[in-house]
């Protein structure tokens, strides 16, 4: 990163949060897939926990507008920042942090659990979307390519599938069966459930970016229709994780929207 770019980011971070900050994601109804929906909800939740308003814009080409090629991304002033990790750092530079109250050991633990979620849940979502032939045929390719006409729709969908499959091969997931992936998800949920215990949030009474990340993925898994319910059933096995999802949904979406008399940035429905 150049010195000029660092100075630009520092200057932007010092500016107050604008009224018209925007979060970009793929089209909600017809295009967005499980993994991108989870990542987008995680960022929206984090911003709400910080008390920072953001407008959600659904664009067919959001992935190609993103500086990293990944969604979601936010447009704040003259800065564009993508993915939760960099967004957390950008927001921290503006004086908003959910984890300042943690000590060094807790902060390291938080980062370890965030890595667990990204390495297990996010990877499992990508695997199910693009490496399970039935899901890819029935859901992922049709939705991913829905904004585009033939033959571009087929080209982009298969290009994305090949990209994800190459990634799975590189990290050693290509040889896994679907049942093994479900078991990985279950083990991840077990670790999260044990860490959460009876606390309202992972580090007791105040949420951190870990809570936003976990909620984004678990809630989206619970409320997204796939070719079967196996993935959601793994999450439903842990009652404290379900209560955790209800708590964040009520506090930061339903209650927040009643107070502001504004619509939720995306459809937040009751967990079955």
Image: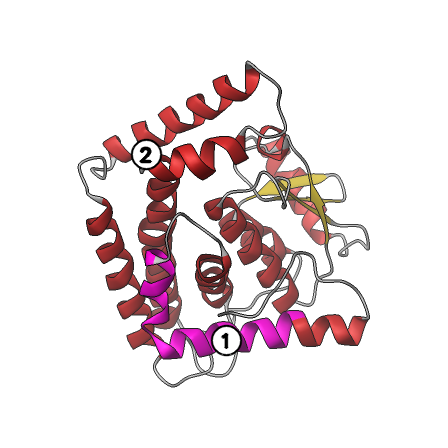
Which residue occupies the foreground of this view, 137 or 13?
Answer: 137
How far apart, in angstroms, are the residues tagged by discs 2 and 1? 45 Å
Left of 172 or right of it: where is 116? right
The crowd level at tag 2 (other Cα within 10 Å; few <14, some 14-19, many 20+) is: few
Q: List x then y, in percent, for residue 123.
A: 34, 45
Q: Percent x, y for residue 209? A: 50, 63
As drawn, 203 above or below 51: below
Q: Residue at horizontal 75%, vertical 56%? A: 17
Asked where in the image residue 81 lies, by quadrant, the reply is top right
> Which residue corresponds to mark 2?
133
- Answer whether residue 31 is magenta in the image: no
- Report which quarter residue 171 is drawn in: top left
Instruction: Answer yes or no: is residue 266 visible.
Output: yes
Of the image marks 2 and 1, the number of the one nearer the N terminus: 1
Regarding residue 69, the answer to whether it shows in the image is: no
Q: Main secondary structure of the magenta part?
A: helix
Left or right of residue 167: residue 254: right
Number of numbered discs present?
2
Q: Residue furthest top?
A: 151
- Give me the disc on residue 101: 1
Magenta stretch bounds: 230-253
> CB of mark 2 within 8 Å of CB of mark 1?
no
Image position of 175 with respect to 28: above or below: above
Q: Residue 117: horizontal and vertical position, in percent?
A: 36, 56
Q: Secondary structure at mark 2?
A: helix
Residue in view at x 46 percent, y 46 percent: 35
Query: Eyeballing the image, is 235 above or below 78?
Result: below
Residue 241: say if magenta: yes
């Amino acid at each position: 990163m150049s010195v000029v770019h660092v100075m630009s980011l520092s200057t932007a971070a010092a500016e107050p949060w604008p009224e018209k900050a925007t979060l970009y994601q793929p089209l909600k109804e017809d295009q967005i897939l499980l993994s991108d929906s989870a990542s987008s909800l995680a960022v929206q939740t984090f911003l709400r926990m910080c008390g920072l308003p953001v407008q959600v814009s659904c664009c067919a080409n959001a992935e190609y507008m993103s500086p990293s090629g990944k969604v979601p991304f936010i447009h704040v002033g003259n800065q564009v920042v993508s993915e939760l990790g960099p967004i957390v750092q950008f927001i921290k530079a503006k004086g908003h942090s959910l984890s300042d109250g943690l000590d060094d050991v807790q902060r390291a633990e938080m980062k370890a659990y965030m890595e667990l979620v990204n390495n297990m849940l996010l990877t499992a979502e990508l695997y199910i979307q693009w490496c399970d032939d039935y899901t890819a045929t029935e859901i992922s390719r049709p939705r991913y390519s829905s904004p585009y006409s033939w033959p571009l729709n087929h080209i982009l969908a298969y290009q994305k599938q090949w990209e994800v499959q190459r990634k799975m091969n590189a990290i050693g997931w290509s040889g896994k069966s679907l049942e093994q992936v479900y078991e990985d998800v279950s083990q991840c949920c077990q670790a999260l459930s044990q860490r959460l215990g009876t606390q309202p949030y992972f580090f007791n009474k105040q949420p951190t970016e870990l809570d936003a990340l976990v909620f984004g993925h678990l809630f989206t898994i619970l409320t997204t229709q796939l070719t079967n319910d196996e993935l959601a059933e793994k999450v439903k096995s842990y009652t404290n994780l379900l209560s955790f999802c209800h708590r964040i949904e009520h506090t930061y979406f339903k209650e927040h929207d009643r107070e502001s008399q504004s619509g939720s940035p995306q459809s937040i429905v009751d967990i079955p």
